[in-house]
Image: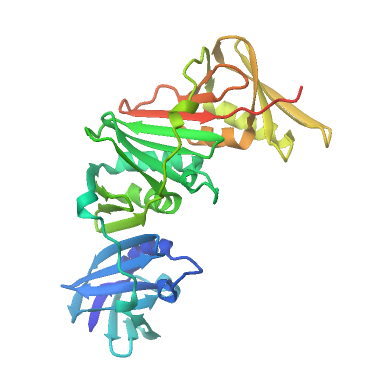
Amino acid sequence: MDFVVSSASLLGQLQLVSKVVVSKNALPILDNLLFDIKDSILTVTASDLETTIQTTIELTSCNGEGSIAIETKKLLEILRELPDQPLTFQINVEDQRIDITSSNGNFSMVGQIGDDFPVIPSIKAEKEKRFNIIPDVLYGGISSAIFATGDDELRPIMNGILVEFKNDKISFVATDAHKLVKYSRTELKTEEEVSFILPKKPASLLKGILPKAFSDIELSFDDKNALFTFDNTKLICRLIEGTFPNYSTVIPQDNPNKLVVDRIELLSSLKRVSIFASQSSSLVGIEITGNTLEVSAKDTDYSVAGNETINCQYLGDDMKIGFKSNFLMEILNNISTTEVVFELSDPTRAGIILPKDNENENEDVLMLLMPMMLNN
């Protein structure tokens, strides 16, 4: 069989799907991309057994049908060095020989039998749940929450994002036991209360793809897998099994102390002052007195210290609370508003951090950070 395809179109789609391919695969054939040609459409599939991405490309011309697995790295290296032009692929399915003809050259490779590529898992019809989600909602939830996911082999349920359909809204929740993020949107109406835990890798892949999506995402899932279908792309992944922690119990409800501060000003101050924090703890102190906020850090092992003061708006009792500086900076970097609100109860309880004057009335963002003990 043979077909002609635009080199730029092929490269763009291969760069998308190849992000699934890992350096050490359980099956050697997973080092390859599966090419399946049918009805003048090329379907390209990449998989690591846990996550699979599939995309389609319209062919300029096509003669014959069939499938073959082609080495990912070699094919990408060729395409990156070629200017945009029609490429002719001639494939012998008997010996898996692949000849690629460009405007001024020819490249030969040997592929593998396409039928040896693992079968893509499917969603069980009897357990399937289906939702349509606009790209902005899914992207907003994943991009806001993914940084708070854990990396703990002993607690795999902490290594993903809880996607929860409840009370006429969709929520994305992630926590590593030190910080927690809950991002909710109210555009999606549902009477069902269902949820699943999306692993970090497919979440990261979706975060990279969704800004370019122009069609709604059709989401379907069962107790094992989730399938995201949009544009000419399908992503199916194995879900994390288990029960996500009851996150609502760690969110303080009575927080009488309210702090409003310029996000960038606080972030910049933290970047400077945290240089003087202990490398082992990254501890910084936040002391609020009236409408003045002092950021301080010290490392007694090296006899270094630093502090800065910035203006703020504060309603509550004077307070000094400690946080891990890199966690606090991560949170501030994942909020986009000019000002942020801190809701605090006392130095031993978690601090809630919220965006102030969020422009999207359908969006609700809550971030939480556990405090650290300050050394007096």
Spot occupied by residue 226 in the image (x, y as percentages of width and height)? 31, 52
Which quarter of the figure has residue 89?
bottom left
**Would residue 338 be visible to someone looking at this image?**
no
Spot occupied by residue 264 in the image (x, y as percentages of width and height)? 54, 29
Q: Residue at x 51, y 24 (%)?
A: 352
Q: Residue at x 75, y 25 (%)?
A: 375
Spot occupied by residue 301 in the image (x, y as percentages of width and height)? 83, 36
Of residues 200 and 142, the one drawn nearer to the viewer in this rendering: 200
Which quarter of the figure has residue 104?
bottom left
Q: Residue at x 28, y 80 (%)?
A: 88
Q: How is the image coloured?
A: rainbow
**Would residue 181 be visible to someone looking at this image?**
yes
Relative vertical location of residue 296 with respect to residue 130 in this rendering, above or below: above
Relative vertical location of residue 11 with respect to residue 116 in this rendering, above or below: above
Q: Residue at x 42, y 37 (%)?
A: 173
Relative vertical location of residue 191 with respect to residue 315 in this rendering, above or below: below
Of residues 231 and 351, the one drawn nearer to the viewer in this rendering: 351
The quarter in which the C terminus is drawn is top right
Which quarter of the figure has residue 67?
bottom left
The quarter in which the N terminus is drawn is bottom left
Spot occupied by residue 123 in the image (x, y as percentages of width and height)? 25, 56
**Viewed as shown, does residue 235 lie left or right of 158?**
left
**Viewed as shown, does residue 107 lie left or right of 305?**
left
Residue with the most extreme left position: 39
